[in-house]
């Protein structure tokens, strides 16, 4: 089978290769084997390849925080997963044609799930949901503000906020993103930069904004902080600028802005296995009911991984880059 391997940490174009690897073999009693249908390229995968992610396993290593697969073999003691099931895998190293994993680490999806959408279900949808659920009690009509609103997480935040009748101010780098965000249900859109606070206040009419969501870091975090009410929470979950967060101490001392961090794994670990399974089913159902689709810009075969990564590193207008390791998805 083919899989992606990195021999050293560095720039994707220099270190990533599609290599031949031994088949994964038969499943043990409590294991399943699946053929990978699709995986997306996420910013965290690129950080992993560069050696800048929190996990840095010994080399050679296989990236891939998420994927969707079709079960091809089931261990003798496995009851809840069947051959042919579409699954997402809660474990890593998914940039491969085939995976053998513990059966309780996969989540079986409804048979009519869209495989390409499901490839992007494990990370960003729960991230968006938990950013809204786990930090500040919010009620209908409340305002929240987020930057990187044009990201996949940003779109999902808008979708989930809309279902809860929360109002969103969406901060992006470029106003060309506005129409798509408005179509998703964004209440307001702003371009990041000077005077963000005053421009946000003009939108809310001075109503309190008690949750700020930041995926940019650097000076952008301070601009979100300035838009928040005293005592509000600013949750950092990404660092697209690559810069350290800089928030003036006055925001924390004078205005008691509470700087928090979000890491999906930590928030899922607080929940038991059954709760996590229910949580994913609930999210899948929510997105289906909302008819929400995560944007996909292009699909690549696994052999073209370098081309796919180069595309993922460019600014994209219509969504994620996906790889289909076992050929076109029917
Ligand atoms: N903490 C967690 O557990 C967790 C979980 C999921 C995701 N994340 C993080 O969430 C972030 C978004 O992930 P995603 O998969 O939704 O991303 P994505 O769909 O690939 O989109 C990336 C976004 O980042 C923006 N961007 C890139 N460079 C930027 C810069 N220098 N300044 C401002 N914006 C910039 C892009 O803006 P343009 O549209 O203008 O190009 C785009 O909207 C990433 O940082 C990711 O690591 C964290």
Image (spheres, grey):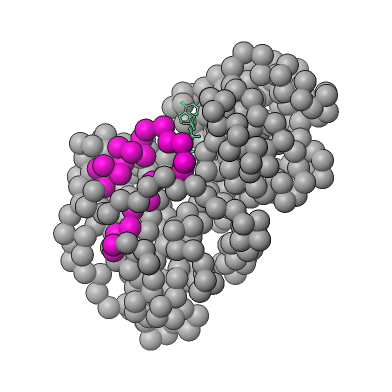
Residue depicted at x 60% and y 31%: 178
Q: Where is residue 283 in the image (x, y as percent from the top left)?
A: 61, 59
Work out whether residue 256 or residue 286 is closer to the camera in this orientation and state it. 286
Quadrant in which the N terminus is drawn = bottom left
Work out whether residue 126 or residue 252 is closer to the camera in this orientation and state it. 126
From the viewer's perspective, is 252 left or right of 314?
right
Q: Is residue 5 magenta?
A: no
From the viewer's perspective, is 69 left or right of 208?
left
Q: Position of residue 52 (x, y in %)?
A: 36, 35
Residue depicted at x 43% and y 36%: 316
Instruction: Determine which quarter of the picture holds residue 11.
Output: top left
Work out whether residue 299 or residue 169 is closer to the camera in this orientation and state it. 299
Residue depicted at x 36% and y 39%: 312
Q: Is residue 321 magenta?
A: yes
Q: Position of residue 157 (x, y in %)?
A: 63, 44
Q: Is residue 274 above or below residue 168?
A: below
Quadrant in which the C terminus is drawn = bottom left
Q: Is residue 214 above or below residue 219?
A: below
Visible residue check, residue 235: no
For the record, the magenta segment spans: 305-327
Residue depicted at x 44% and y 27%: 242
Visible residue check, residue 100: yes
Please state the total of marks drawn on the protein image. 0
Q: In this view, does 7 lie above or below 172?
A: below
Q: Position of residue 158 (x, y in %)?
A: 65, 43
Q: Is residue 39 above or below residue 228?
A: below
């Amino acid at each position: 089978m083919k899989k992606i391997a990195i021999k050293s940490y560095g720039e994707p174009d220099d270190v990533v290769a599609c290599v031949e690897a031994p088949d994964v073999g038969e499943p043990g009693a409590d294991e399943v084997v699946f053929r990978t249908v699709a995986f997306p390229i996420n910013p965290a995968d690129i950080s992993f390849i560069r050696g800048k992610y929190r996990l840095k396993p010994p080399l050679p290593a296989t990236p891939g925080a998420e994927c969707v697969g079709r079960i091809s073999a089931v261990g003798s003691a496995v009851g809840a997963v069947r051959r042919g099931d579409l699954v997402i895998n809660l474990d890593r190293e998914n940039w491969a044609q085939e995976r053998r994993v513990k059966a309780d680490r996969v989540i079986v999806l409804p048979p009519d799930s869209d495989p390409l959408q499901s490839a992007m279900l494990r990370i960003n949808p729960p991230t968006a949901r938990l950013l809204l659920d786990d930090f500040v009690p919010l009620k209908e009509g409340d305002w929240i503000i987020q930057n990187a609103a044009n990201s996949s997480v940003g779109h999902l935040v808008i979708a989930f906020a809309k279902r809860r009748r929360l109002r969103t101010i969406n901060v992006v780098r470029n106003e060309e993103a506005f129409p798509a965000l408005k179509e998703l249900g964004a209440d307001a859109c702003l371009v990041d930069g000077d005077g963000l606070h005053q421009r946000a206040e003009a939108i809310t009419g001075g109503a309190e904004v008690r949750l700020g969501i930041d995926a940019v870091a650097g000076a952008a975090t301070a601009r979100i902080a300035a838009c928040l009410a005293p005592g509000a929470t600013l949750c950092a979950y990404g660092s697209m600028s690559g810069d350290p967060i800089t928030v003036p101490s006055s925001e924390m001392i004078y205005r008691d802005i509470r700087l928090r961090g979000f890491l999906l794994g930590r928030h899922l670990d607080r929940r038991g296995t059954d709760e996590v399974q229910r949580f994913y089913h609930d999210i899948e159902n929510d997105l289906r009911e909302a008819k929400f689709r995560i944007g996909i810009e292009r699909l690549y075969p696994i052999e073209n991984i370098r081309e796919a990564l180069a595309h993922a590193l460019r600014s994209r207008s219509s969504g994620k880059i996906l790889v289909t390791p076992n050929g076109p998805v029917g």
